[in-house]
Amino acid sequence: MPKTFMPGFSNREELLSHQLRGLQWTIQHAYHGSPFYRERLTAAGIQPDDITSLDDLRKLPFTTADDLRRGYPLPLLSVPEAEILRIHASSGTTGKKKVLAYTRKDLDDWVHFFARCYEMADLTPMDRVQIAVGYGVWTAGAGFQLGCEAFGALAIPAGPGNVDLQCQLLIDLQSTVMCCTASMGLLIAEEIARRGLKDNIALRKMIFGSERSSDAMRARIKDLLGLEDMFDITGMTELYGPGTGLDCSRHEGIHYWADYYILEILNPETLEPVQPGEPGEMVVTTIAKEAAPLIRYRTRDLTRAIARPCSCGSVLPMHDRILGRSDDMFIFRAVNIYPGQIDEVLSTIPEISCEYQVRLDRRADGKEYMTLKVECDLAADQGNYTEIAATVASKIKSSIMVSSEVEVVAYGALPRSERKSKRFFDNRA
């Protein structure tokens, strides 16, 4: 199939020229359209005409989630209210939700590059896409559905949860693609296996969003369902919504849509660029967004830049899968730990399955203790649990430099979730 939704750049230089024009437009647009940005840029000594190269990006001030909350209900607004066609909101855990406005062009751009995700995942118009994500004020349902329809495949708006309905739709409508969280994907895969329905469905691909998925979890889902492929989709409400990047079938990294935003990977403490290959915080600047543009927005998401081009030949750059969030970091016995680090270590141990829990406690002796509860692999012998626990503890110690107590439980003993699984419990307070 011809690539309808991919950008037409033939080389990196053309992409960078496009980014510079977009950055210059964004600063002009935000400065003249948004009192917030005009005040912030003026305080930083920046006038729109000062932006002459992409290097000037580092002169610009940062924007944070607190700026969005303080500007509630229409933060960062850079167009007249009459030009707003829709709003979406993120599910913030504290305080007011982050509400973002969209113009007609913003919505058209979002739908276009979301359709690009389906194209990059090598779907065809004959695919039937079961969309098992949240609808409403959240961006997920609208993004997945409108992008699917723009691409030309059949959209099945199943919504989240309701395992019985999901299984029925998979059978009755012969869905070939399912979009959901990885936790939901595991729940569905195990339920299909439990009910013996694998031969009654036509599912061949899954697209995961909203949470990090480990290699072990992906391997388990793929094995249970006999999938051809699985993909990670990225995005956030502030940056249009889901659909701002996807890994292609080579799975060498997440291609991100650099024709719509500029990505920096910065040290979350110093806010300076990290060394190539080092993890850092994703900071994004939009270059085409009208209603609520982002200028050096601190996403708090952690990843690594991938400098090499993908073997698929795409000019679009890549970053690694999301490792976690900078504000999810916890300190245990003076060691800074990100949840994704534990996830990566556990994925290297074949004797355990994909679900686990981490509990942090402070006991009567005043010391801190970490307990890892891990599921064994379905084929593991219960007589080997002690040996498996020792292996897990040893690998955590050598990789993350902390000691942990490990409890191995039977496959399926830990809870499954239709949304995001909660795996970290800090009881030290």
Image (cartoon, rainbow, N blue to C red):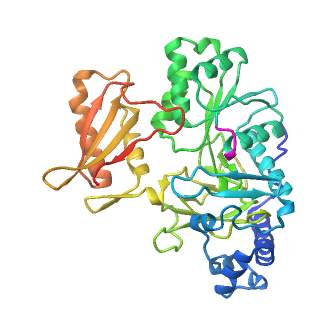
- Is residue 186 highlighted in magenta? no
Q: Nearer the viewer, residue 204 or 191?
A: 191
Q: Residue furthest bottom?
A: 45
Answer with left or right where residue 12 lies relative to residue 372.
right
The residue located at (52%, 73%) in the rendering is: 271
The residue located at (38%, 22%) in the rendering is: 378
Q: Does residue 10 sit above or below 414 in this rendering?
A: below
Q: Quadrant of the N terminus?
A: top right
Q: Position of residue 100 (x, y in %)?
A: 70, 58
Q: Position of residue 37 (x, y in %)?
A: 70, 76
Answer with left or right where residue 409 lies relative to residue 197.
left
Q: How many marks?
A: 0
The residue located at (68%, 19%) in the rendering is: 169
User: Can residue 240 be seen?
Assistant: yes
Prevalent SS, magenta region: loop
Q: Does residue 59 sit above or below 293 in this rendering?
A: below
Q: Position of residue 161 (x, y in %)?
A: 58, 29
Q: Does residue 408 sit above or below 316 in this rendering?
A: above
Q: Position of residue 25 (x, y in %)?
A: 81, 72
Stretch of the chain drawn in magenta: 134-139
Q: Quadrant of the C terminus?
A: bottom left
Quarter of the view holding residue 32: bottom right
